[in-house]
Image (spheres, rainbow, N blue to C red):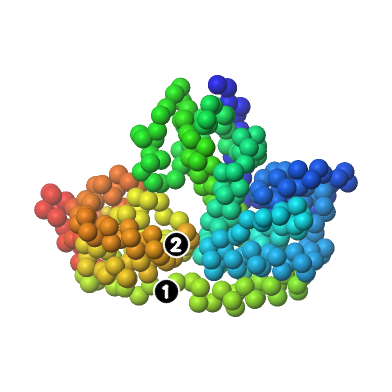
Amino acid sequence: MAFVPFKPTHLRSAPPRLLTFSTHMPFMADVLFCAKYPFTRSARELMAEKKLTLASIGGDAVERAKKRVMGALKEGEIPKFIDMDDVAELELGAYAVSRILLSLVKNRYFINRYAVAESKRASAYLRDDSAENVLRVAGEIGIRGEKENEGYVMPVVDYLLYAPGAKDYKLINKPLRSGAVLLTKREFTRVLEEAVRLGIERALPFSVPEAPGLLTRAADEIRQEGKGLEPKYEAKFEGGDFPPCIASLVERLKMGENLNHTARWALAVFMLNAGVSVDAIVNLYSFAPDFDERITRYQVEHAKARGYKMPTCSWMRSQGIGCEPPCRLSTPLRYKGGKREESPEAAK
Ligand code: SF4
């Protein structure tokens, strides 16, 4: 299997490309592809052909863009269109405008929640799409892969960049061959979903000089309507301040960062062992951009019922979620009232 070298170009924060190009009419199939996957190179090129500029953005595209953003913020999803043919071009424009609006609003929680919804929408299309289109999307966002039998193969190095944090996706649980990992279609599209999410998160916000009133007004409306959608977290650790590792996880979560599975698990186990209620923990996780109350509550209650013990500081360090700044403990639970109670082992 020969993989061509590539650069993960979508990871670079690039300003929006809104201008230039020729006038040939794209095929409808291409317009549909671009509307389903508006983050791809083809979509950017098509938008350039359409000569979309800040001044030329119309009210329809702004209205649709606002719906797209508010759908992501309120429902956590951007619906698929049943009859995409009629609205494909408008949807493509709405995607570009959504990114501009979010850049004007400049709210990290909103951006991350939108990125999750947009990547899930793409994933829903990918699951039903042909292998040719799945590989086209992968290639256009800088991910190498090939079809093999019923599944896909991709280089381990690409896989490690975008594999979800869940246990099933740990490399140790995946079949490997000659530097490549073998995946089912569902797994391959899940990896693409993660790459799309990260690409959108990292590219926003960008600078929007001299935005017309139509856009600034829509951005203000999103700010207004978005008030109250950001969760609040009030729970306190009975021992006082959180240890640095946990405080950092809480802060990252509150900024709307999509913590990986290990970090979420460690945080929940710490909170449970510190006596924080299930309700308060669920409330804390409501900051997660992919928050689902029913699933979160089930997982936290499950962790409580299993009585998981807090892992050690050395385990936390081994997972890259401990010690910023470092304190010399054996377990984060020994951190009391902002003071560091050194463990006998650590004090040696
Ligand atoms: S030493 Fe332990 S409690 Fe302190 S930051 Fe590191 S992992 Fe957290």
Decide which of tag 1 and tag 2 comes sooner along the chain: 1
Specify few, some or many for label 1: CA neighbours under 10 Å numbering under 14, 14-19, or 20 or more.
Answer: few
129 vs 17: above or below = above
186 relative position to 99: left or right: left
Residue 93's quadrant in the figure? bottom right
Q: Give residue 291's mark.
A: 2
190 relative position to 101: left or right: left
182 relative position to 121: left or right: left
76 vs 222: above or below = above
Name the quadrant where ligand 1 sits: bottom left
Q: Position of residue 59 (x, y in %)?
A: 78, 69
119 relative position to 16: left or right: left
Residue at the spot 57% in from the left edge and 29% down from the top edge: 146
Q: Are marks 1 and 2 in contact (CB under 8 Å)?
A: no
Specify few, some or many for label 2: CA neighbours under 10 Å numbering under 14, 14-19, or 20 or more.
Answer: some
Quickly name the residue at label 1.
Answer: 232
Q: Secondary structure at mark 1?
A: loop
Q: Is residue 184 visible?
A: yes
Q: Give residue 275's mark.
A: none
